[in-house]
Image (cartoon, coloured by chain):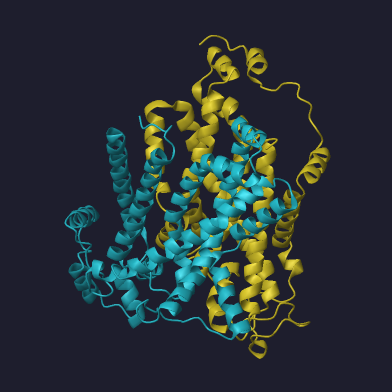
């Protein structure tokens, strides 16, 4: 067990290292830099001024030195300075984190609450009308862009209830209910999409388990449907579901990129887009690395959770 | 190398010889009967393909032409689905947007799947250290959400149709490689592959001529499954202004520029492009699911 975790951690670190190279190279390939963005706003380019800014930002150094400096900084807990705001990157990123984490958690709760029950019902009533209805419902969730669903939700609220959701971030300490509503709407839009994947995996896992001998035995003992499904079948079907929930939690951030923009929430994902457009490398690099770390950690957590949920799983 | 017994290669290495071949019409008829939902999805995809091909015939207005006299017009006889804030006809823009979505969707899916497929084939067939290294490298690409990687890619490549296709295809590569590798691992152990090896064929020939054709089932499933996701990513990129550039009408960008601002005055700006995206993705998802159930033997009868 211990050696398994150690091995997984080594692989995780190597993967993160590879990712840092990929991200760094990609960003340096990008046409234009922060200085171009700044000057294009001003409408003219002053070459000597441009050089001065580049030097000040350390962008005149060879790429390999920039890379080494970035990695060294990370190991010293320093995320560098934002080009655009001239503030330490950490100072900018930190207040964004709770917003995105809260959104990701709420979306996951929505996804599980929607996906698991529909998946179970759909499997129990396989090929019935209810099964078809739920499959179409979940597939619809997989097909709608979550940012568009968010726009439609806002539109519906405006035209039917004549109520406009708050356009700026409301702190929970300011007005808890408004804050809750503000977060529930995007969580619904994003969670609906993830629920589709969870529903499908729940359905297929349940179908598999429901064909097992011990389920037939449970039926033969005269157990009610409720007991067979919940007590006997679900326990063994939940493992693949946990995997998908874990993977989805990490990948929700992808969906949040656009949804945070639609709902104007000051989270990591929306800020990433802005930073990319501004070529604010320290912010982009560190945000992408942050997302990668979240993805890898949640994958690791899922693997370890396996052992807790299923005693048959042994780590070699 | 000894003289290669060509006849023997054909004899020994063709799996499923003499299997009855059904006509295309019969296959389609059976598919429609067994998978009505999948067939409906197929029809949606077909409609989208036809719309994209005949966009010039189907349009009622020039999709790029602005009309200051008719901005934010409601849907009606003059403009079937209304106009946007610049007076451009929404219906014609959606019809032409099908072209962009389809080209980017199919282009990036095929590019990513073929690249990933080749990597998966070689890495699965070679096994050992090569396989291990390839897998770790793919892990790196897969460690980021599809949209985040596509976002960084398209920002670094600059806005153009080709670059958007490349940006979306790269995140598909590791996913495709995984699928193809998994099926190569089982095919590799089959007797007819062993026979081919016993005949002294070169590895590359075995991999491409004898193993590859049998991964076509999973490959088709993969492509149809990724198509919907690729269309969604294109829409999201264009929405954020990092996708297909002006003046091409793109569904995602139709939602971004004006929609948010004018949504209250003109809800059709938000509704119709989104419905177009959803229907296209819904169709390809339905079709892909049915295809997977039909082609993937593990799920047959499930």
Q: Residue at x 55, y 59 (%)?
A: A193
Seen from the viewer's position, the closer of residues A116 and A301 is: A116
Determine the residue located farthest toward the front in the rendered image.
A222
The quadrant the C terminus of chain A occupies is: top left
Taking the image as shown, residue B278 lies to the left or right of residue A308, namely right
Q: Quadrant of residue B16?
A: top right
- Residue B252 point in image, percent of width and height: 56, 68
* A59 versus B19 height, above or below: below
Name the image quarter holding the N terminus of chain A: top left
The percent coordinates of residue B220 (x first, y second) are 63, 41
Colour chain A appears in: cyan
**Residue A256 on image: x %, y %:** 45, 64
Return the residue nearer the eye: A80 or A2.
A2
Residues B197 and B302: in front is: B302
Question: Is A219 located above or below residue B107 in the figure?
Answer: above
Chain B's colour? yellow
Q: What residue is drawn where x is 55% and y is 32%?
A: B183
Q: Residue furthest top?
A: B2
Specify the quadrant of the image occupied by residue B7: top right
Q: Residue at x 75, y 75 (%)?
A: B60
Image-based side of B96 in relation to B76, left or right: left
The residue depicted at 25 percent of the width and 67 percent of the height is A89
Whether residue A249 is situated above or below residue A44 in the rendered picture: above
Q: Position of residue A180 (x, y in %)?
A: 45, 74
How many marks on residues? 0
Residue B250 seen: no
């Amino acid at each position: 067990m211990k050696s398994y975790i150690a091995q997984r951690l080594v692989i995780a670190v190597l993967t993160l290292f590879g990712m840092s190279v990929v991200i760094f190279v990609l960003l340096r390939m990008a046409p234009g830099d922060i200085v171009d963005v700044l000057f294009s706003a001003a409408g003219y380019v002053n070459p000597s001024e441009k050089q001065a800014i580049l030097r000040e930002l350390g962008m005149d150094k060879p790429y390999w030195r920039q890379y080494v400096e970035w990695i060294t900084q990370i190991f010293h807990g320093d995320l560098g300075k934002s080009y655009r705001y001239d503030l330490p990157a950490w100072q900018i990123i930190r207040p964004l984190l709770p917003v995105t984490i809260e959104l990701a958690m709420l979306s996951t709760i929505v996804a599980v609450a929607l996906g698991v029950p529909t998946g179970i019902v759909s499997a129990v009533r396989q090929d019935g009308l209810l099964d078809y209805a739920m499959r179409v419902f979940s597939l619809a969730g997989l097909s709608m862009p979550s940012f568009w669903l968010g726009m439609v939700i806002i539109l519906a609220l405006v035209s039917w209830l004549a109520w406009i959701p708050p356009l700026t971030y409301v702190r929970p300490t300011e007005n808890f209910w408004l804050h809750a509503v503000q977060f529930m709407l995007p969580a619904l839009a994003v969670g609906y999409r993830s629920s589709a994947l969870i529903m499908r995996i729940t359905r297929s896992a349940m179908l598999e388990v429901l064909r097992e001998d011990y389920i037939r035995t449970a039926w033969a003992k005269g157990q009610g449907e409720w007991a067979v499904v919940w007590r006997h079948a679900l326990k063994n079907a939940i493992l693949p579901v946990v995997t998908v929930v874990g993977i989805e939690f990490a990948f929700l951030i992808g969906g949040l990129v656009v949804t945070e923009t639609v709902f104007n929430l000051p989270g990591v994902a929306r800020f990433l887009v802005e930073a990319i457009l501004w070529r604010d490398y320290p912010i982009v690099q560190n945000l992408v690395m942050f997302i990668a770390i979240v993805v890898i950690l949640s994958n690791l957590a899922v693997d370890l959770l396996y052992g807790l949920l299923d005693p048959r799983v042994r780590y070699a | 190398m000894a003289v290669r017994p060509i006849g023997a290669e054909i004899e020994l290495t063709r799996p499923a010889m003499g299997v009855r071949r059904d006509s295309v019409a019969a296959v389609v008829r059976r598919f429609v009967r067994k998978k009505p939902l999948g067939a409906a999805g197929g029809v949606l995809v077909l409609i989208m393909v036809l719309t994209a091909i005949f966009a010039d015939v189907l349009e009622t207005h020039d999709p790029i032409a602005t009309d200051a006299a008719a901005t934010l017009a409601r849907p009606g006889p003059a403009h079937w689905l209304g106009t946007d804030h610049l007076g451009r006809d929404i219906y014609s823009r959606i019809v032409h947007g099908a072209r962009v979505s389809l080209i980017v969707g199919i282009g990036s899916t095929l590019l990513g799947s073929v690249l990933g497929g080749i990597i998966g084939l070689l890495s699965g067939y070679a096994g050992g250290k090569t396989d291990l290294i390839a897998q770790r490298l793919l892990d790196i690409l897969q460690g980021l959400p599809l949209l985040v990687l596509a976002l960084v890619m398209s920002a670094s490549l600059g806005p153009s149709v080709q670059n958007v296709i490349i940006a979306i295809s790269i995140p598909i590569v590791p996913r495709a490689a995984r699928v193809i590798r998994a099926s190569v691992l089982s095919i590799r152990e089959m007797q007819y592959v062993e026979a081919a090896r016993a005949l002294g064929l070169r590895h590359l020939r075995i991999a491409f001529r004898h193993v590859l054709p049998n991964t076509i089932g999973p490959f088709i499933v993969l492509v149809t499954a990724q198509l919907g996701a690729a269309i969604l990513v294109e829409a999201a990129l264009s929405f954020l202004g990092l996708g297909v550039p002006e003046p091409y009408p793109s569904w995602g960008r139709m939602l971004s520029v004006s929609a948010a601002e004018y949504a209250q005055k003109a809800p059709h700006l938000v509704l119709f492009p989104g419905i177009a995206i959803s229907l296209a993705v819904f169709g390809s998802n339905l079709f892909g699911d049915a295809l997977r159930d039909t082609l993937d033997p593990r799920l047959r009868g499930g």
